[in-house]
Image (spheres, grey):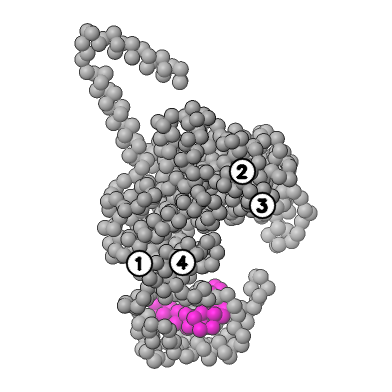
Amino acid sequence: MLLQINNQQKLQQQQAYDYAALQSNKRVIKNGQNISSQIYAQKKDAQKRALTPVKTSGQKFKQYTSPQIKSIKTMTNVYGGNQLQIQIKPQNKTQLPPIMTQSAVPQGQKKSVFIGKGNNDQLIREFFEKKGWNVLDSSLKFWTKFNFKWVQTINEIDWQFFHDGQQIVNHIQNISIIATKSGLVQTIKDFESKDKFLASSYGIHSSQFMPETFRLDVTRDDYSIEEQNFLNQKNTGLWINKPTNFNCGKGIQMVSDIKKFKDEFTRLKSQSYSLRQGKSIASTKFQVFHKKCIIQRYIESPLLLDKKKFDMRVYVFIACTDPLLVLYNPGYLRLSMNDYNKENVDDNNEKFTHLTNAAIQKKHPNFQKNKENTIWSVERFEKYVMQNYNVSLKQLDELKKKIKSVLTYVIRSAEKKLDKKQGCFELLGCDILLGSDFTPYLIEMNHNPALHLDTVVQSQVIPQVVNDALEIVMQIHEKQEKPELAIKGEFNTRCFQTLINEANNFCFLRSQKQNLQQVGSQEIKKDLTPVSTKDKSLSTFQTLQSQQSMKEHS
């Protein structure tokens, strides 16, 4: 039987695995979890190394007896690669390395940060190098003694050995509840069905900002209520099919014949047993939607800029979960390369028309020549719509409030579920599509937003967002014992606006509701204020005009 970890055994096991990761950069299986990127060359070498006292830069462990390895077994993982499974005998308390019981990183040692490769990691590296931090080598991917860790995926964080409140990582453990397509749908539906009173108190509902969406799973024999509702939908309009756990536009398909799609889905459901067994089935167009996906009604009348479809890449920054602090940045706009045409959904170049993801648009043959026109600043957008759609500043202000209200509502829907570990934060890239009537629709939220600086606008926006986010995180978590003290009041930030700050009892949605109530109260007071005979005619005219306006809008 594998070792059941208690506090004492956990420290012993951590010592052995930390050493293996640091000295050899080999692969070990820790309770069935893969913790490094390569496999041991020989079993005996692994045992010999794990029994040797550890010495690291900046500190030396006292001599102690390392845990005895009971056995080392070679196993084959699901990908066909070899891995090792190590069983460790329980040891006496006197054999524990004493420094491991205090903190993640010894006091007085130079602060260290691990930065995972990819997604413009140089931007993060430059920030910490300017701070004088020690940037750990990329081979120390599973080294657990760090002050700060920045990686692309949640799976790159060993949560079992994360020191809550003493270390900082750039992900929240269960952020998938809003940062995956299916998770976002499920979280909002749960909130609106199980906490109806609170959800309704915000004066907003998901039907106002989310396209009609259904989750499909062809590996299940039975049909969920959502799947039944989807099959009962009229066979009209355009739809879009998206795999649940992919990003960058991977696997997305436009669906013009929804009846054909339903038929194919039903056929795949009938072969669910074969799919669960991993067996191949007859290839079809819709098989690429994988085993789990969402089918979403397509917004056929989007607002256009220079005849092109676009979306707004905005940022939601969850700086702290307890107390909750959520900030917002308006980001930039992403335009498609091709002019919008809803008749070309079956064309080979449909993605360059209907999907605004940068990863998709980069594949267009003319992207390099026209890339600056695919990314707009918020200022350019506002100027354009004021000139071409006759939009006023007041209307633009209302649009901004609607977008912030939508994002605040989504975070509130997930608030009770979010993991509350101290030292965890999340920078989310959120995609907002505007309808032709300027209604904002939330398309998705991404926990690993692209940080590449391909255009001038991105070079102006992204570094500022990232640097401000890191500064705020460090400001908060320097007050580890009482983080709520660090997030009271305003922040010295250039680019973020507050959506939620529990320490100050602030919620953007609540503030908007209060403002509306105050305006209404002031209007009532005006109506009750006596007017002179001279002003009666004017007052009567204004009242009649207001009533007529209400009739026209009702």
Estimate the spatial distance between the alpha carbons at disc 3 and disc 4, rounded to whole Å: 28 Å
Residue found at x 40% / y 31%: 394
Q: Residues within 10 Å of mark 3 (few under 14, many from 20)?
A: few
Kindly identify which numbered label has been placed on residue 157: none
What residue did someone put label 2 on?
Answer: 336
Q: Which residues are magenta?
A: 7-35
Estimate the spatial distance between the alpha carbons at disc 1 and disc 3, rounded to whole Å: 43 Å
Circle nearer the N terminus (4, 1): 4
Displayed quadrant of residue 59: bottom left
Q: Position of residue 267 (x, y in %)?
A: 74, 48
Residue 544 vs residue 14, the one in the foreground: 544
Identify the amino acid type marked 4.
Answer: Arg
Residue 490 vs residue 94, the one in the foreground: 490
Identify the amino acid type marked 3.
Answer: Lys
Residue 465 in the figure: left or right of residue 280? left
Estimate the spatial distance between the alpha carbons at disc 2 and disc 4, rounded to whole Å: 31 Å
What residue did someone put label 3 on?
Answer: 363
Q: Answer yes or no: is residue 226 visible.
A: no
Report the mark closest to the observer, 1 or 2.
2
Image quarter in which the N terminus is found: bottom right
Q: Residue furthest front?
A: 369
What residue did someone put label 4 on?
Answer: 125
Circle nearer the N terminus (1, 3): 1
Circle nearer the N terminus (1, 2): 1
Instruction: Examine the structure image and report whether residue 541 is included in the region drawn in magenta.
Output: no
Q: Is residue 383 above or below residue 168?
A: above
Kindly identify which numbered label has been placed on residue 165: 1
Q: What is the secondary structure assignment of the residue under circle 4?
A: helix
Q: Is residue 125 above or below residue 380?
A: below
Q: Are the residues flagged by discs 2 and 4 in contact, CB closer than 8 Å? A: no
Q: Residues within 10 Å of mark 1 (few under 14, many from 20)?
A: some
Estimate the spatial distance between the alpha carbons at disc 1 and disc 2, rounded to whole Å: 43 Å
